[in-house]
Amino acid sequence: MFKLPIEDIHNILDLLTLDTLQKLACVSSLCRAVVVNYLNRRKSILFAKYVEDAAAFNDLLRCTGSVVSGSLALQLILPRASTNWHSTDMDIYISLSHKSTVMSFLADRGYNEINVENASPYYPLSAVNSVITMAKKSKTVDVVVSSTLDAIYPIFQFHSTPVMNYIGADSLFSAYPEMSTNFWGLLNSLSWRGGGRTRGYMNALAKYKRRGFNIQVVCAPCDVRVEGEHISRGYTHCRRIIRTSDDENCLWMSLDATRVPEERSKQGDAVVVWCLFGPCDCTVAVKRNVRLIIV
């Protein structure tokens, strides 16, 4: 396959899921280089729709620990051949300590602040400090400022599982890769707390339904008879399962060709613990020296 022209190789890779691409990248150093080059190329194309210098923007993500989520991240998580929509804006998730750096970067590239919300209809809990909307002609960037030191915290309070993904400077992450690649999702009960069922919230759900996602309130089947079995077996499609961003059911992939795609270094990174059904009083043991955030 690698004797084909690079465009033909990329057309083949367009058909593969992220899980398959990760496995292919583990076959050899050549496979790793081809897959990582392909994903970085797709990432740069997506970024370039909003920021002309995609490399400089990627450096900004790296130095601030910021990530891109929402529709743009979902487009990169899904096979390119299965996404027939165009994202209408870019969502950048940042920590409060790097707010000025990110805002200055966007302002230097022609973006102007048009709106600030201290409470977003998509995040009725305390995950978000503010949402700042920046615009440049027809382009819109939403800067979601986390209320914690970690940019990724709000992502696990979003309305449903298809958007629990993010693009880092050198990595990709999906909390529910199997469901997302099969265009199936679960509603996040956390997002319903505090009056989260606003018009904006419902419009967001409707948008992903129009894109072909089947978003359910409960897993099927998930009743009293099977719920305990789901939990005992670690059935991740059940809303009562307690998950962490570091567990084996998440998919994390390196976009650095020099690193093993599945080898994730958590030193200094936050581990987020969440449950789609709602908060839980259980104790989660984390063996590594990491920051633990319970959503």
Image (spheres, helix red, strand yellow):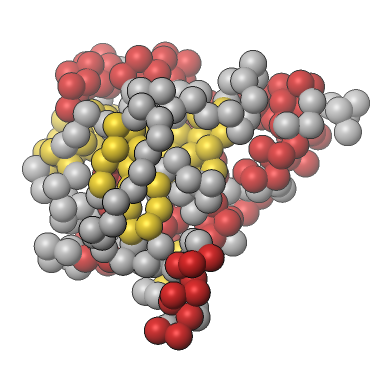
As drawn, 237 above or below 148: below
Q: Quadrant of residue 82?
A: bottom right
Residue drawn at x 25%, y 49% as measured from the top left: 295
| Residue 285: percent from left, percent from top | 36, 43
* Front one among 221 and 120: 221
Q: Quadrant of residue 32?
A: top right
| Residue 160: percent from left, percent from top | 37, 60
Q: Is residue 38 left or right of residue 124?
A: right
* Front one among 44 and 239: 239
Residue 99 visible within the image: yes
As drawn, 14 above or below 148: below
Residue drawn at x 16%, y 55% as measured from the top left: 124
Q: Number of labelled discs?
A: 0
* Front one among 274 and 113: 274
Residue drawn at x 50%, y 74% as measured from the top left: 229
| Residue 162: percent from left, percent from top | 44, 56
As drawn, 272 above or below 220: above
| Residue 228: percent from left, percent from top | 44, 75
Image quarter (top left, top right, bottom left or bottom right) of the N terminus: top right
Q: Is residue 280 left or right of residue 177?
A: left
Residue 209 visible within the image: no
Residue drawn at x 16%, y 36% as measured from the top left: 147
